[in-house]
Structures are given as C-alpha cells and as structure tokens.
C-alpha cells in the first residue's frame, strides 16, 4: 500500500539529458521494487514508507557515485 510520496531532485540538472547520475538513482529505486516517474525537474515515487526509507540510502549512494553534485529529497504522507 502506498502511504508516502517521495520527490527527488538530482543535480546537475541537464535539460533533455538526465545523465548517468539520474539513471543510477532510477536504477536503485527499481532494484528496491519501486516505480519512479521522471518529471521535467524532479522524479517522484509513491510507495510504502518503510520501502522508501530503505531505498533512499541506495539512491543517494548511486547518485553521488555516478556524478551527482547535490540531491534533494522530500517525503510526504499520502
């Protein structure tokens, strides 16, 4: 049951070219069984709060290991 909404902004931002740093975050989310919706500025994921919390560390590591310079995350209850 999805009870949380995660929004992720991975920088550097490149219009129409998300780059390997964004792809790595998406791959880490998918490996955790989450489905990401990549928008024009941020990526959103709806899921169970425990599942999201468990995946966030992997997403952070993946992003920075692949060239991210900053990441912003926001989680809201749904």
Image: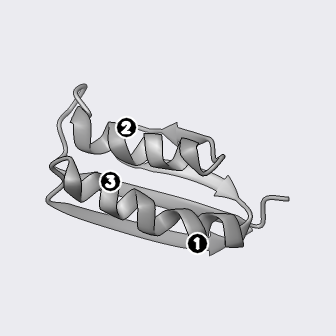
Label whose residue precedes the other's in the sequence (1 or 3): 1
* Element class at badge 2: loop
In this figure, which residue is indicated by the disc labeled 2? 40
Q: Quadrant of residue 2?
A: bottom right
In this figure, which residue is indicated by the disc labeled 1? 53
State the image coordinates of residue 16 (x, y, percent, origin top left). Answer: 25, 25
Residue 37's place in the image compared with 45, above or below, is above
Label whose residue precedes the other's in the sequence (2 or 3): 2
State which quarter of the image contains the N terminus: bottom right
From mark 2 to mark 3, how far is it between C-alphas? Answer: 20 Å
State the image coordinates of residue 58 (x, y, percent, origin top left). Answer: 43, 61
Residue 15's place in the image compared with 3, above or below, is above
In this figure, which residue is indicated by the disc labeled 3? 62
Q: Quadrant of residue 35?
A: top right
Q: Quadrant of residue 19?
A: top left
Res 11 label:
none
State which quarter of the image contains the C terminus: bottom right
Residue, far top = 16
From mark 1 to mark 2, how far is it between C-alphas? Answer: 24 Å
User: Do tag 2 and tag 3 residues touch (Cβ < 8 Å)?
Assistant: no
Label whose residue precedes the other's in the sequence (1 or 2): 2
- Which of these two is toward me, 65 or 22? 65
* Element class at badge 3: helix
- From the viewer's perspective, tell me whether residue 66 is left or right of residue 10: left
- Disc 2 crowd rating (10 Å Cα; few below 14, some 14-19, many 20+) is few
From mark 1 to mark 3, how far is it between C-alphas? Answer: 15 Å
Tell me which residue sits at (43%, 68%) in the image.
57
Q: Nearer the viewer, mark 2 or mark 3?
A: 3
State the image coordinates of residue 22 (x, y, percent, origin top left). Answer: 31, 42
């Amino acid at each position: 049951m999805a009870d949380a909404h995660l929004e992720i902004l991975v920088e550097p931002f490149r219009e129409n070219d998300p780059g390997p740093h964004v792809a790595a975050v998406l791959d880490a989310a998918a490996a955790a069984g989450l489905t990401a919706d990549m928008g024009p500025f941020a990526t959103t994921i709806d899921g169970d709060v425990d599942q999201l919390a468990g995946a966030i560390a992997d997403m952070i590591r993946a992003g920075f290991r692949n060239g991210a310079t900053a990441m912003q995350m926001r989680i809201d209850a749904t």
